């Protein structure tokens, strides 16, 4: 079936061995990451083999481009930080009040 004496049952044993070693839950993630790596590798080799005069630093991959954020007014940002700090303080007080009866009961 295959060259060099590799037969179908050899492949089945290899697949079972991989599933046992890595687990069925981690295989889709591993395959996905390998696919992304291969895609990046192919793109890089294509760039090297293709147009060498084009600047690669200017072209950023689509995955790493970020949408510029609209600057928020400083007063609104300060207000949000103050609100979050107040909420954090309230949660700490609630947690301390909830822990205190448990300590007295012990």
Image: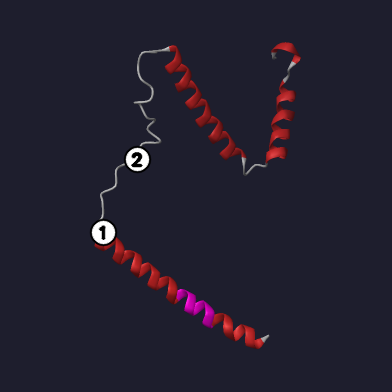
The answer to whether residue 60 is above or below residue 49 is: below
Residue 94 in percent (x, y) is at 48, 79
- Quick one: quadrant of the N terminus? top right
Q: From the viewer's perspective, is 7 left or right of 71?
A: right
Q: Residue at x 37, y 32 (%)?
A: 62
Magenta-highlighted residues: 91-97
| Residue denoted by label 1 | 74
Question: Of marks 2 and 1, which one's residue comes earlier in the chain?
Answer: 2
Q: Callout 2: 10 Å neighbours few (<14), some, many (20+)?
A: few
Q: Residue at x 38, y 22 (%)?
A: 56
Q: Nearer the viewer, residue 35 or 57?
A: 57
Q: Residue at x 70, y 34 (%)?
A: 18
CA separation in Å, label 2 and label 1: 22 Å
Task: Report which quarter residue 88 is drawn in.
Answer: bottom left
Residue 76 in percent (x, y) is at 26, 62
Task: Report which quarter residue 58 is drawn in.
Answer: top left
Majority secondary structure of the magenta segment?
helix
The answer to whether residue 68 is above or below residue 55 is: below
């Amino acid at each position: 079936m295959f060259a060099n004496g590799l037969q179908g049952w050899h492949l089945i044993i290899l697949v079972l061995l991989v599933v046992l070693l890595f687990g069925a839950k981690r295989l889709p993630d591993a395959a996905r990451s390998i696919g992304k790596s291969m895609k990046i590798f192919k793109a890089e080799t294509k760039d090297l083999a293709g147009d060498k005069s084009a600047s690669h630093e200017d072209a950023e991959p689509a995955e790493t481009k970020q949408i510029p954020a609209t600057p928020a007014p400083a007063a609104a940002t300060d207000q949000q930080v103050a609100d979050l700090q107040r909420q954090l303080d309230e949660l700490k007080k609630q947690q301390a009040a909830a822990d205190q009866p448990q300590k007295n009961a012990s």
